[in-house]
Amino acid sequence: MASRSPSPKRRRRSDPQCGRCAKRKHLYLALDDWRGGYSVHKLDPDDMPDTLSSEPPAVRVTGPDIGTMAFAAFGANILIAANRNVVSGAFRTSPPSLIYSTDTAALTAGPQLPHDHLCDLSRAITAGGKLYARSCAFDKESGSFHDYLQVLSSTNLEHLWDPSFKWAWHSESSSSPPFLVPGREKVTCHALHPDGHTIFMSTDLKITYSFDTSNGEWKELGDWVLPFQSQAYYDRDLDAWVGLHAKEVRCVCLCPVACRSAVAVRPPECTMLKERLCRYKEEDEDDPKATTTTLTYLGDGRFCLVDNIPCGDEFSHRDGSVVHVTLFGLKYDSKGELRTKAHRTTRSYAVSKNNCFFSHATFWM
């Protein structure tokens, strides 16, 4: 019996000669879905597959025996790095990272993570094609911690035979963050201003700061916080930041863009989406750790909500998990209430799990 040929739409999407398709952005979903390590799946939001196994992943990487991999995006690249293991109170030297180019589908060796105490890459921030990660180091002379930012950016290769990497980490130490408790004040959420170079950060001490990547200037904006958890995104149609609410677990909300130059007395007003888009097991409704939920902005007023729900015990990966992907847009109705647009796409994927300390990562590029 002759095998069925793939549909023209599928064939056209994977055809390397199709210049129009090569320029289209895709949703990249990183999962620990095989015993050896991690996969990064490339998904078309206009043609979501019924199963993740219908097409091979964009890239697969073997994970470390101990610890997890971390994923972060900058420009058109995905940084894949192994978190260093702590042994006897000290950090092991980290191996070189990997950088996957979504433009060329090439995997390149990248630099090691900096040797000081680098924060989780899942909270790294992208601005201007660079990756910013908060870092801190212990100053032996003063006996205290020192906060600064580590920046991953492209380098100029001046020496032809020097085995340098195309990207390198460097310290943004000219202007230290004005945190009240260096090394211990935790950034709870961040958002990029529509200007493309000012990053807002709120901390667990109920203070919001801004950092201008164009000149390295920090500002303390007031004793208030943005209403989000993790990252919020600017939606031009709504002229607002959109993210997951920090207290109303798994709820989508938005707020106006805060002023980047003046100190404010109160936080921007928050508007909640009353519709519940997140999936979770009924018994885990009040447990924010049972389900990991992320929100990613796809541009043109579209968002992607991903829920990864373990099938068994939270600390066991034997039973795998179910990944729910919801694509939606937002609008105000005639009563001025925030609603989802009529067209919504949902898919659910049963996947294997390899590491109980990793859930997923999503990127749009």
Image: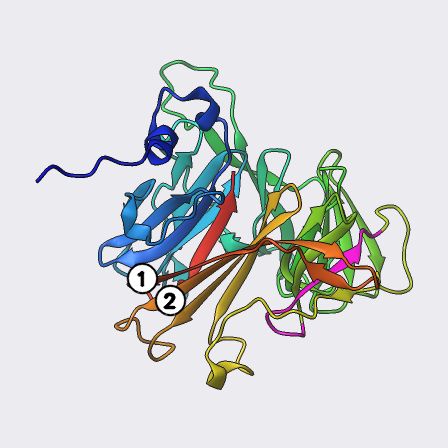
Over which residues does the magenta segment extend?
247-258
Mark 1 lies on a secondary structure that is strand
Image location of residue 161, percent across then percent down? 35, 15
Which quarter of the image is occupied by the N terminus? top left
Q: Residue furthest left?
A: 1
Mark 2 lies on a secondary structure that is strand
Give whichever of discs 1 and 2 has the lower sequence position.
2
Q: Locate residue 13: give its quadrant.
A: top left
Per the rendering, the mark at residue 351 is: 1
Foreground residue, 154 or 77? 77
Q: Is residue 327 left or right of residue 174?
A: left
Foreground residue, 107 or 300? 300
Relative to 173, say whether 280 is above or below: below
Q: Residue furthest front?
A: 1
Relative to 139, say whether 199 is above or below: above
Q: Residues within 10 Å of mark 1 (few under 14, many from 20)?
A: many
Q: Are marks 1 and 2 in contact (CB under 8 Å)?
A: yes
**Residue 40 on the magenta segment:** no
Q: Which residue is mark 2?
A: 322
Q: Residues within 10 Å of mark 2 (few under 14, many from 20)?
A: some
Q: Locate residue 5: give its quadrant.
A: top left
Mark 1 is on which residue type? Val
Real-space Cα separation, disc 1 to disc 2, in angstroms: 6 Å
Relative to 307, say whether 237 is above or below: above
Image location of residue 181, percent across then percent down? 70, 65
